[in-house]
Image: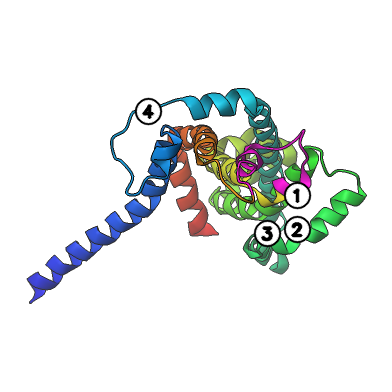
Amino acid sequence: MIIKSKWYYRVLQRALVLAMLALAVVPVYIVVSNSFRRALDIKRMPPKLFFDPILTHYSRVLSVDSFARYFINSLIIAGCTTATVILLGTLAAYGLRLFRSRLGLRLSNIMMLGKLVPSITILIPLYIMLNRMRLTGLYIAPILAHAAISVPFVTWLMRGFIEDIPTELLESATEMGATRMQTFFVIILPLLLPAVASAVILTMQSSWNELLFSLTLTNIKTYPLTVAVARFTGAMSVDWGKCSAAATITLVPIVLLGFFMQKYLVTGMTAGAVKG
């Protein structure tokens, strides 16, 4: 009876793994394959597994729709957001480590409430504030919006790493005459490189793929890639070929970044969650 239960457990476990793998891989395969299919083949049901690939959709996206400009916009917004979030989140976590109090011990967890609130609930007040400051339509508007969402999580993540740093190390730096900021940049920050790497990929991915704030706070000159892909969806029809090609191009940079930084991502998530 025990052997059978273990056998059924293995089958169920593998079935769940395959189901989750299919949910993750199949949509990506459909998007990528559709970007190489003809328009008629995209709408064919059931779809063909083997087909003659074409590059027409890519040439239309890259040449006609100024896609390179949107790509640069995404790089600017995601890059500046990541730099801002890493700096503010790491300094905030360091401050919570230095200035211990009953409120400070709970503050990083309280900050996580901002991450749990749906983005659409803060869209209107955020738009009103940025619009009154005449920042809408500029790069700074989506950068501030994305940073407001990501800073609480990065603070919570970094706090878990900083808590692991021995207090004696900080005290020895102070006794040698180093200021708190010198201690941070010379001693603390090099020790946080795994956490910084994981925070970079998580923040970059969040900002790169974000649509709601980018669609509302930017204009045609500052549209990122996500808005460019959404523009291919019309009220009456959808150009699935161009959408798939644009989505595939959008997917490549962040996938490569995640692939090369995967080991840091796993380490950072694990260590941060233990102490958070």
In this figure, which residue is indicated by the disc labeled 2? 123
Dot in front, 2 or 1 = 1
Is there CB contact under 8 Å for labels 2 and 4? no
Residue 212 picture location, percent across and down: 68, 52
Q: In this view of the protein, can residue 219 be seen by the observer?
A: yes
**Disc assigned to residue 216:** 1
Residue 262, by quadrant, is top left
Mark 4 closeness class: few <14, some 14–19, many ≥20 residues within 10 Å: few
Frontmost of labels 1 and 4 is 4
The reply to whether the C-beta atoms of the residues labelled 2 and 1 are less than 8 Å apart is: yes
Residue to which mark 3 is pinned: 119
Mark 3: secondary structure: helix
- Residue bounds of the magenta highlight: 214-234
The percent position of residue 165, horizontal first and vertical second, equals 55, 47
Can residue 176 be seen?
no
Which marked residue is nearer to the observer: mark 1 or mark 3? 1
Q: Secondary structure at mark 1?
A: helix
